[in-house]
Amino acid sequence: MCGIVGYTGNAPAAPILLEGLEHLEYRGYDSAGVAVVSPDKGLQIQKCKGRLQALREKLDSLPPLEGTVGLGHTRWATHGEPNDVNSHPHVSQNGRVAIVHNGIIENYAEIKDFLLHKGVRFRSDTDSEVVAQLLEYCFTDHSDPLDAVYAVLERLEGAYALGILCADRPDMLIAARKDAPLLIGYGGGESFIASDATAIIAHTRQVSYMEDGEVAVLTRAGVQVFDQYRRPVEKQRHTIEWDVSAAEKGGYAHFMFKEIMEQPEALRQTISPRLRDGRLVFDELELPEDRLRDFDRIFLVACGSSYHVGMLGKYNLERFLRLPVEVCLASEFRYSSPLVDERSLVIVISQSGETLDSMAALREAKARGGYILAIVNVVGSSIARESDGVLYTWAGPEIAVATTKAYSTQLVLLTMFGLWMAEKLGRADPEDYAAVTAELALLPAKLETVLADTGVYQYLASQYFNHDCIFYIGRNLDYALGLEGSLKLKEISYIHSESYAAGELKHGTISLIEPGTLVVALATYGQLFDKAASNIVEVKSRGADVVGLTTESFRPRMEQLATHTLTIPDTHPALQPNLGVAPLQLFAYYIALQRGCDIDKPKNLAKSVTVE
Ligand code: F6R
C-alpha cells in the first residue's frame, strides 16, 4: 500500500523518481507526487490525483524540477479521499519540510488536535500530514533535523515508512521505518530508498532492509543508519539476484497474463532445488527432528489468496501428517487469543512478506511460543526476517495486483513441506510419497499443457462476460480451489461471485440459482466426482449453465453433465489444484479483458497490504 522512492546523488532526481514510481504503481494508484529539493529553489512539489501518467503530463507541461535529492510517492488512500490535496508529498505549513508516508498514523487525530491548538493550519484530510506539521513544529526546539525527526517518531503511533526532505538541507534525505517496508539502495555516489527493490533495480542491486525503529540519513557522502535509541547500526548488504526484465511486461499486454504464463517456470524454481533423486530436501530449514516431533498442531495463517493456499494446505497436511491443522485469517487470528504454544507450528504464508495483518499474527504467535515458519516470495521481507524458518517460493517479482504465480508456488511448497515433514515423522505412506514426488517432477510440464491453448477460456469469457453473478462450487480440495477462482474473478472483473462447498448449496444458496445463472463446477478431486456430479445435476435442473472443470480421465462423464467442459491432466490428487487453478485464472482474466477492466490495477486494491 503506497509506494515510496527516494534519491540522493548527482543526477536530476525527478526522472529517477518517476521511473521508480512506475514500478511501484501496483502498490497504490489513487494519486502520485514528487518532491525535489535544491539549494536555489528549495522544496518543489508536484502531485495530483490519478495514475502516474497524470503526474507525468503535469510535469511535462512545467519547467523541470531542479535538484538531485528527492522523494516520490504513489498512494493507496486510507484517510482522506483520493484528490490532489490529499496526495503526497505533504508539506508543512511554512514549507520547511516535505514528507511521504506509507502506513497509518493511528494517533493522528490527537496530534492534529494538539497542533491545531498551537495554530497550525492543515491542508489535507490525511493522517500523514501530521508528520510534516509535527516535524516543523519540533524544529522550534531542535535545529538539527535528525533531533527533530527523533522527537516526532517518539510521538507517532501506528505504522510508517517515511521519507523526509528539509528545505534548508538540500543535500539530505531522511527515512524512518516501523511496520511498513523500506529498503536502502547503494549506488556509486548515489543512494536510494524504496518500498521495494523493483523501484531501484535499474540503478543498483545492493540493498539493505530497514528494521523497525531505524532511521537512515542519506547524503551524497553515503548512508548512515541509526536504531531507535540513535545508536549507529552497521547494515548488512544484500544483492538482488533477479533480473530487471522479471519486473517488466516483456511484450505481454498485462503483467497478470505474463505471470500466469510464467507459472510452469516458477514451479520449476520452487520444486527443483527441493527434489533430489525422488526425495524431498529442505536444506534451508534448521528444524531438528525432535523439534518436528514436538509439534502437536499446525496453524496456517494468511490473508486473501495466501489464505486460500492455507485452505488447500489443511486438506493435504492433515492427510499426510494426521495432525490437526487450523487455517486462520491473519486479521482474525491476532485478536482471537489463539491457542498457540511451544508445541505449535505456525506457518505464515505471504507473497509480499509485508502484509500487516500477517505480520501482526506472526508476532502474536511468536509471543505465545509457537515456532514460526514463513512461506514467502519476497527475499528479505519483514515476515521472512522475523520468522524462525523461511521457505522462499522463488516465483520472481509478482507485479499484477491479483496473485497467480505466487499462489501456485506457495501451494506446491506447502504440499512439499507437509509431505517432507510426514516422512521425517515416519507418517508418510511410502507409495504415496513416491507417487507425489514422481508427479512433482512432472508438474511444470503438465501445467504448460494447460496453458498452451487459451482459446477455450476466451470463448467462455465471450459467452459469460456480461453476467452479474457467477457461482463456484466444489468439494474438498475443489472447494478450496473454488474460493481462489471466485476471488480472481471478482477482484479483476468486478463481477459478484460466490464460492460454495458443493454439498452446502442445498442448505440455502441454491435458492439463488435461476435459469441462465453460471455455475463453475470444480470436480478435479476424483474420489468425490460422483458427489460433485449430483450437485451439478441439482443446479442444472434449476436452469443453471455449468462450466465443469475436471481431469482428463473424467472428461466423458463431465461432458454428459456440464454445458461446457474444461479439463486438466491427471496428477496426484494432492497436486491437482496446482493444475486446476490455471483455467480459473485464465477464465477470470479473459472475462475482465472483455469487460475492459484495468486488469493489473483493479479498483480499490493494492498489491502489498500494509495497513490493518
Ligand atoms: C489476491 C491477492 C491478495 C493477497 C493478500 C495477501 O489476488 O493477491 O488476496 O493474497 O493480500 O497478500 P500476501 O500474500 O502478500 O500476504
Image (spheres, rainbow, N blue to C red):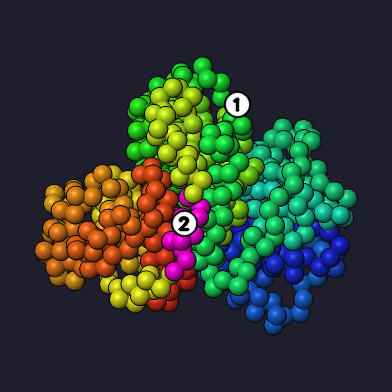
Q: Which residue is mark 2?
A: 447
Position of residue 499 measured from the top left corner of the image (x, y, whole percent): 28, 54
Secondary structure beneath disc 1? loop
Q: Amino acid at mark 2?
A: Leu
Q: Quadrant of residue 133?
A: bottom right
Give 84 or 498, whichever is nearer the viewer: 498
Q: Looking at the picture, how far across and down is residue 9, in whole percent? A: 84, 59
Locate residue 600 relative to residue 558 in the image: left or right.
Answer: right
Q: Is residue 387 magenta?
A: no
Q: Position of residue 100 (x, y in %)?
A: 64, 57
Q: Is residue 303 above or below residue 567?
A: above
The answer to which of marks 2 and 1 sits earlier in the sequence is 1
Q: Looking at the image, is 185 positioned above or below residue 595?
A: above
Point out the stretch of residues depicted in magenta: 443-453
**Residue 579 lies in what quarter of the image?**
bottom left
Judge: label 1 CB < 8 Å from ligand 1. no
Instruction: Give me the disc on residue 286.
Output: 1
Name the residue: 64% across, 53% down: 195
Number of other residues with Cα within 10 Å of mark 1, as a class: few under 14, some 14 to 19, many 20 or more: few
The overriding secondary structure of the stretch rendered in magenta is helix
Q: Residue at x 72, y 35 (%)?
A: 227
Horizontal side, residue 492 vs residue 563: left or right? right
Relative placement, left or right, of 560 versus 602 is left
